[in-house]
Amino acid sequence: MPTSIGGRLIGIVKNNTNRRVDFVKVTAKFYDHGGRFADVQWTYSNPSFLKAGDEGTFEIYIGKLPIS
């Protein structure tokens, strides 16, 4: 039976402001089944700048996290 899991988190972010934002950083915190903090990873959106109303994508690679 595996004792850890990895993968990737893929998503979309949207600039809901009325101005351009630069270097949009996406942070993801991961918790185990017991609610205990397990890891944190971050990346920048693609593109790293978003004009008002624009959307960008992100992909965060998740290292090996213990599973209980």
Image (cartoon, rainbow, N blue to C red):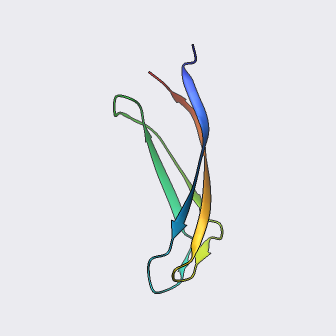
Q: Residue most toward the left?
A: 35
Q: Is residue 12 positioned above or below 63 on the image?
A: below
Q: Residue furthest top?
A: 1
Closer to us: 3 or 39 = 3
Question: As displayed, is residue 23 above or below residue 38?
Answer: below
Q: Position of residue 48 (x, y in %)?
A: 62, 70
Quadrant in which the C terminus is drawn:
top left
Image coordinates of residue 24 in percent, x first then y, are 54, 69
How many numbered discs sit on the rendered protein?
A: 0
Q: Residue at x 58, y 18 (%)?
A: 2
In which quadrant of the rendered view does residue 61 lie? top right
Residue 23, horizontal then vertical, whole percent:
57, 71
Question: Is 64 rendered above or below residue 16?
Answer: above
- Report the residue at 57% width, 29% height from top: 5
- The N terminus: image quadrant: top right
Give me the residue at 52% from left, 59% from top: 26
Residue 10: horizontal and vertical position, in percent? 59, 52
> Would residue 14 be found to the left or right of residue 34 on screen?
right
Toward the right, the furthest residue is 47
Pick the residue in front: 57 or 38: 57
Which residue is depicted at the point 45% across and 77% down?
16
**Quick one: 10 or 6, which is closer to the camera?**
10
